[in-house]
Amino acid sequence: MIQLVLARHAKSDWADEGLADHDRPLNERGRRDAPQVARAVSRRGVRPEVLLSSTALRAATTAEAFAAEFEVEVTLRDDLYLADPARLLAAAREAGANEVMVVAHDPGMSALVSRLADRDVRMVTCAVAIFTWHDGTWDDVDATAPDEFDVLTP
């Protein structure tokens, strides 16, 4: 089985206009939504073996909320910051696990989810897309339709 879980970071704080984009934290809503959505994903039986995240503060903080729920370590990757769909998918494949979660940014996240779902999907902040190929391998991802697909939103 292959399970790919794709999450857009939770809502970020724009109060400090002087902060670099990479350094923006979560706002109050983001800090509330991330653990709530993590619990909802967990209730569906999702348990990623590997959790990858962009190094941007808002993504890393979101990933930490999921990591606490799943009891897994977060691996921060510079190449996931504002990554395109190809880089996001390559990172998941390179993780060396069958159940992988990636926390990153739009527009890459919405583009990848839309491509894998074969329909237009807008990933709002803290949305999580869950793809499952029951008898698949990583070669099936992006080559065949998933057996299951769902999106959870805050």
Image (cartoon, grey):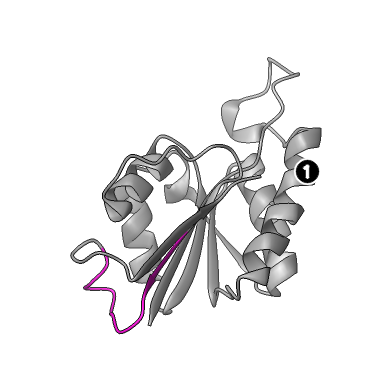
Amino acid type of disc 1?
Arg
Q: Nearer the viewer, residue 43 or 125?
A: 43
Q: Quadrant of residue 109?
A: top left
In which quadrant is the C terminus drawn?
A: top right
Q: Pointer 1: what residue?
A: 31
Q: Which residues are magenta?
A: 130-141
The answer to whether residue 125 is left or right of residue 147 is right
Q: Quadrant of residue 131?
A: bottom left
In which quadrant is the N terminus drawn?
A: bottom left
Confirm whether residue 86 shows in the render: no
Residue 76 on image: x %, y %: 56, 57
Residue 47 on image: x %, y %: 59, 76
Residue 7 on image: x %, y %: 53, 52
- Label 1, secondary structure: give it: helix
Q: Is the residue 122 above or below the residue 46 in the image?
A: above
Q: Nearer the viewer, residue 116 or 27?
A: 116
**Which residue is most to the left?**
143
Q: Going 57% across and 73% down the picture, which residue do you hit?
A: 46
Residue 127 on image: x %, y %: 56, 46
The answer to whether residue 14 is left or right of residue 81 is right
Q: Is the residue 87 above or below the residue 67 in the image?
A: above
Q: Is the residue 124 above or below the residue 7 in the image?
A: above
Q: Quadrant of residue 134?
A: bottom left
Q: Going 75% across and 54% down the picture, which residue do you hit?
A: 36
Q: Is 101 inside the magenta-drawn segment?
A: no
Main SS category, magenta section: loop
Report how many numbered discs are placed on residues in the image: 1
Q: Nearer the viewer, residue 150 or 15?
A: 150
The answer to whether residue 16 is left or right of residue 134 is right
The crowding category of the residue bearing disc 1, from other C-alpha atoms within 10 Å (few below 14, some 14 to 19, many at least 20), is some
Confirm whether residue 3 shows in the render: yes
